[in-house]
Image: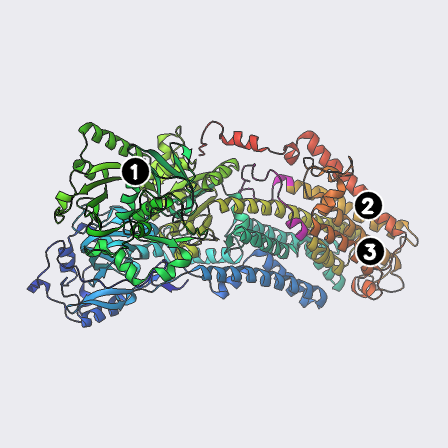
Amino acid sequence: MGETVLPAVAPVEDQAEKPPICGFNGPHITRTKGQLQPNAGDGDALPALNAPHTLSFEEVAERLGVDINHGLSYAEAESRLQHHGPNKVKGAEGLSMWKILLRQVSNSLTFVLIIVMAISFGIDDYIEAGVITAVICLNIVVGFWQDYRAEKTIESLKKLTAPEATVTRDGTTDIKVKAVDLVPGDIVQLSVGSIVPADLRLIDGVNAYTNEAFLTGESAPVEKKSWKTFDDPDLATGDRTNLAFSGSEMTSGRCRGIVVATAMNTEVGKIATMLRQKKEDGPRSANFFVRSSTRFVNGLKTILGLVGTPLQITLSKFALLLFGLAILLAIIVFSASKWQVDGEVLIYGICVAVAVIPESLIAVLTITIAVGGKEMAKANVITRVQSAIEAVGGVTNICSDKTGTLTQGRMVAKMALIRGAGTFTIDAITDPHNPRSGNVALEDQRLNLEHFTPDTVTARFLCTIALCNNSKILPLHNSRNDYSTENKDYLDRTSSGDDRDTDASTIESASRPPTATIQDPSNGPWKAYGEPTEIALHVLASRFNMGKEKLLTTLNIHLAAEFSFDSNVKKMTVIYKDNKTGYMDVYTKGATEFMLPVLNVSDHEKDEINLAAENLANLGLRVLCIAHKTLPTGTAIDKRDLVEANLTYIGLVAIYDPPRLETKGAVRECKIAGITVHMLTGDHPGTARAIAKDVDIIDDRTSASAVMVAKDFDKMTEEQIDAMEYLPLVIARCSPTTKVKMVQALHRRGRFCVMTGDGVNDSPALKKANVGMAMGTGSDVAKDAAEMILTDDNFASIVKAVEEGRRLFDNIQKFLMHLLISNIAQVILLLIGLAFKDRDNHSVFPLSPIEILWVNLITSSFLAIGLGLEESQEDIMYRPPHDNKKGVFTTELITDKFIYGFFMGALCLMSFAIVAYAGPGGGDLGRGCNEGYNDTCDVVFRARATTYATITLLLLVTAWEVKHFSRSLFNMYPNSPSSAPPGLSIFPTLWRNRFLFFAVVAGLVFMFPIVYIPIINEKVFKHGGITWEWGVAFGAVVIYIAAIETWKAVKRGCGIWSGAHKVVSREDAEARAGLVGGVLQEK
């Protein structure tokens, strides 16, 4: 990826200038002798600053040698910049074009093909060498183009920002500098919408809240408490509330801070450092020779493709095995000639070696995976590393972040308990900022908001949450024009303390509460500005057509005073004055425990209110208390404690970050497919448990050990974790190391793990997991660490990715079976064919080298591609994950390929022998018929053409037979409705996969011109035209089909391997997953 200044954040509009807030909370530092501004050039003498959250801001300022009111001098800032370097965080290492290219050739099979190509050129067999060269180039070009296009797509998803910072230097405040030029000791001012440019120890602030979800995973903004000092140096990142972290966003208030860390020393930088570590990195040896040998071995494994997905490793090992087998077979050929290796013997040996290598395998695999990648892109999954498509099919566990992955990443009102009106609930929300998204119910009865008129109490509640609010919501198409800097000034009043009267319309007051009809509905997306809690409340009011803008243009009122939210009193109050009567309405919202003392209710009622609030909080909801009172004309409103007294309780409102609608169903589909879902979040345990329960990761009967706090999990040793019967399903307050530790624990249990996430905090685990999936709107660092990108941020897309991966795995087995059957048959044919001697006692080729290449590269390739495009089986997501240790080469596949290959090789031998020895002129194999045609070669050329026709026809039939390893070709889809008569269902089967059907037809059609066209048949393929011999070839087909169908019947009858498997129903899969009786836990 190169270097980026900060993690990706959504662009923000320019903020209005704010005056400095020096002196709000705490004493200033006076310049004493011990705190004089350091001289330029002394920057390199600054001591290391560890755990700044355990120091007061005065101690931090002293250690960094800065006066908080004067700031650094320009000379000192330049000196420190030279020493510390630019404030840039190096992200995960991106892929260059050369690395993408190297990825295409880093596998054993490609190297084997390169060796065969070199030998072919060495013996002047340019046709064979040219064909193999074309295969290698095709694989590299297709693979390179797929990976390169994926990288370009991901680049287009990135939204890099390089914000400016507002600093104090040489005693001058509000100086704009580039964030990359910040140095430790700089004094930075932040306001609403600012992006924190470096890690800061806060000095002072007013109602300062930052959004740290990208770093900690906590969805709600975090209140910053500059006056606090902590004792625990290992305190969780999310609990260090006296620090502001690089890349987080100010959602409300203002503050100042001292830069304590820049670049790679920030929390984001530490995560980037973890990302730069390789998956297999372990403890480094102190011995130079051990380190060197380790690097050499790791490099060799990478070049040979012995690292990567299970399929990559398996195929690379298989290629090395084939290479060894090819050498062995060549030795057998040379030994049969008693090591008198002349030109013919050498060519025959190479021919046998070529026959054992599936030259088209890598090209077919590349094309099949590329097609799978295209299908995944349609399902909103972009694959950076193409081999990950197959790998994701074997996933056994999914470790998911909560915020923005399982949930929508935005706060919404979930419930409102209104005194005297009842309980309102909101669900099925797809767009949290759209007032028309979701359903509203009153006492579990769904409301039609177009015809619902709130009663007086409900209207008062809605007026309170709308008017005691500084957020703004509007349709996206209006947001760019309507939300000006002037409006932002208005929104920031809570920070500036501006209590001026607000201009308002003076139209006549509404005679009754408005109905819930929203004018000019827009079905498009909506945009919101302001603090997330206030946005959620504003959206709730707007659902009933009682948004702030609507009320201000309907009611004849104006803002008389505002008491901004204060972290000391945990309340916010606004006072609106009726322009006609002069009466004033006080609207207040705040934390329940701070609101109860100012309510004019009995102690019994306070207990009931408190109990209701606690019950909601235990559900993981954030609860606010809503109150109101009316003041007569002339009442003094300058004292907050008097205004916020004797308030009338209206109700409670509960907000939260809701799960995505499709998440619950996706989690269920994962369980049915035998996949365990874990939630790893930086949020609080109560919220984590509530969301996990909402999406069915856990239920009421889940054991307590299934939910853990990261602090407890992190304390456990590997031995203690491995001794646990079950790994936790939910871990709260996670740090990046916690997620990595969980992935490692799964690996030690032999699990194949997928990690999903969108934040920088997810990136190390994304890279460590077998397959990392980042969200499309997530941070750039996360995208670079992942193998896959979910462009719609939808957890449900993972299910589609797994299904596509499983389909691809099944199809890889099918075309591997097809290709290897051909190779085994050719090896049997050529080895036993050593016994076919001509007049000079030289072995005669039953198949010429070009015939072998044509069969392997042309005929088999298109058939294999067709098998790679096979549709998924109906129960593909009802089966448990396949065993990644066994990989594609299961016992059944290995056995079947030898049985099929034996039948095919034996029938090809039979075809050659019948024509060469039993037909007209039989027994005379001529002289020099391996090199070309002469008058003595008629029998050999006819026998060779018959063998070529036989193996071609058998391969065409095999392509349909291997569609399923145990079902009969005549009853391949027993559960699919078919209009074909019994016994004739073979015809719909053949037509079902159109590509495969036309590949078979093309193979059949092209066989005839290759046999009959002059020059091509004799000069290139070294065979001749045939007549009665077609009967031999088609007779072999009948025998072959009978043999294969008999073997399949034996497997079904004896219950061997896939023959014992019936189609798994959804009910069976649900029962296996334990979904009928509760939530399944897996070891």
Is residue 256 visible to the viewer in this orientation of the structure? yes
| Mark 1 residue type | Thr
- Residue 575: give x, y in percent of width and height: 20, 48
In depth, the one of 841 and 407 nearer the eye is: 407
Which secondary structure type mostly characterizes the magenta part of the structure?
A: loop
Image quadrant occupied by the C terminus? top left
> Could you tell me which secondary element the residue under label 2 belongs to?
helix
Q: Is residue 359 left or right of residue 104?
A: right
| N-terminal label among 2 and 3 | 3
| N-terminal label among 3 and 1 | 1
Is residue 879 covered in magenta? Answer: yes
Q: In this view, does 563 lie above or below 342?
A: above
* Label 2 sits on residue: 1036
| Mark 2 residue type | Ala
**Label 1: few (<14), some or many (≥20) within 10 Å?**
few
* Label 3 sits on residue: 944
* Label 1 sits on residue: 456
Q: In this view, does 502 lie to the left or right of 292?
A: left
* Figure quadrant of residue 273: bottom left
- Residue 1030: give x, y in percent of width and height: 86, 51
* Figure quadrant of residue 82: bottom left
Q: Which mark is residue 864?
A: none
Image quadrant occupied by the N terminus? bottom left
Which residues are drawn in magenta? 864-892
In depth, the one of 440 and 233 nearer the eye is: 440
Q: In this view, does 122 lie above or below 841?
A: below
